[in-house]
């Protein structure tokens, strides 16, 4: 349908700390967009079901150890392997709502010793560029009230605080459409903000070419 009209879907990304509500809001957004007559689908990274995704899953669950550059590149490869499908869907008019993307990749790896932001970005240069990046900002006390950390890798206060600083560095890039959302509010309020910004992004993106990230 969208293809015939030459209108593409928007690429909308949700980022934010542990328990900020990314997965919850991604689901609510896809439902709301569909209800309003848009074609929309959800995606998430890591996508643990692919072969590469299984390596990542096992690493996060601490069932395996991987060298730090290696796991970084696997996270990136896990995005690249979805790119043909993503492009096809966007081109056909489907809006994609993505739970974590390259910004997670850079924010997390760059907190490790001897990694810098520049190196961390390279593997993801050229990925489809999001039309909107929603950063769900929640203060640590509120996040803690949503349940404790799980047992996966990176789920410690110390690491998460460093990750947040990296996100704020990434948000200084004004060539990207970052929007900070107060995600400490009630689910419904957070959802309303996200839905309004997303509908605007869909309108703005529909007759613009899809960009390339960090190029
Ligand atoms: N990682 C990486 O290193 N490199 C990469 O390239 C990528 C990722 C892509 C796995 O991520 C790890 O991989 C992650 C980054 C790293 N490491 N960490 N940390 P994941 O996406 O699989 O897992 P996660 O995002 O950390 O977990 P999360 O806890 O799923 O967070 P969330 O999706 O933001 O939250 P949620 O599940 O929607 O909500 C959490 C709880 O709060 C839940 O009970 C909700 O019902 C509740 N909730 C949500 N919103 C509200 C509001 N507004 N009020 C009250 N309660 C709420
Ligand atoms: Mg999640």
Image (spheres, helix red, strand yellow):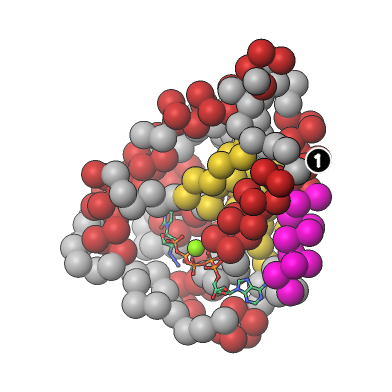
Q: Secondary structure beneath disc 1? A: helix
Rendering coords of residue 153 (x, y %): 34, 70
State left or right for residue 62 relative to residue 184. left
Q: Is residue 161 left or right of residue 135?
A: left
Queried whether the magenta region covers residue 188, the answer comes back as: yes
- Identified at 24% across, 69% down, the residue is 62
Q: Is residue 116 above or below residue 162?
A: above
Q: Residue 191 versus residue 35: which sits nearer the camera?
A: 35
Mark 1 CB near ligand 1 (8 Å cut) = no
Image point (59%, 23%), residue name: 92
In the depicted structure, whether residue 68 falls above or below residue 162: above
Query: x and y percent of residue 119 in the render?
Result: 43, 43
Region in magenta: 186-196
Residue 74's spot in the image, x, y percent? 31, 45
- Whether residue 111 is visible here, answered yes or no, is yes
Quarter of the image with the N terminus in it? top right
Task: Name the residue: 39% across, 70% down.
Answer: 154
Q: Is residue 168 visible?
A: no
- Main SS type for the magenta part? helix
- Residue 166 in the image, given as x and y percentages of width and height: 56, 59
Looking at the picture, does residue 62 appear above or below residue 27?
A: below
- Mark 1 lies on residue: 200
């Amino acid at each position: 349908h969208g293809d015939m009209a030459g209108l593409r879907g928007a690429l909308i990304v949700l980022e934010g700390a542990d328990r900020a509500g990314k997965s919850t809001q991604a689901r609510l957004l896809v439902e709301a967009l569909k209800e309003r007559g848009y074609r929309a689908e959800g995606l998430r990274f890591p996508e643990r079901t692919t072969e590469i995704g299984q390596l990542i899953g096992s690493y996060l669950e601490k069932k395996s150890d991987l060298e730090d550059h290696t796991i970084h590149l696997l996270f990136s490869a896990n995005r690249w392997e979805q790119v043909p499908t993503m492009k096809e869907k966007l081109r056909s008019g489907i809006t994609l709502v993505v739970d974590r993307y390259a910004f997670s990749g850079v924010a997390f790896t760059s907190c490790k010793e001897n990694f810098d932001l520049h190196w961390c970005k390279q593997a993801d240069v050229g990925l489809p560029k999001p039309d909107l990046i929603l950063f769900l900002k929640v203060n640590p006390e509120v996040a803690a009230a949503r349940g404790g950390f799980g047992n996966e890798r990176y789920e410690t206060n110390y690491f998460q605080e460093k990750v947040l600083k990296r996100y704020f560095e990434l948000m200084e890039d004004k060539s990207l459409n970052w929007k900070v959302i107060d995600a400490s509010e009630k689910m419904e309020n957070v959802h309303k903000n996200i839905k309004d910004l997303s509908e605007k992004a869909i309108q703005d993106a529909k007759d613009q070419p899809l960009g390339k990230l960090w190029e």
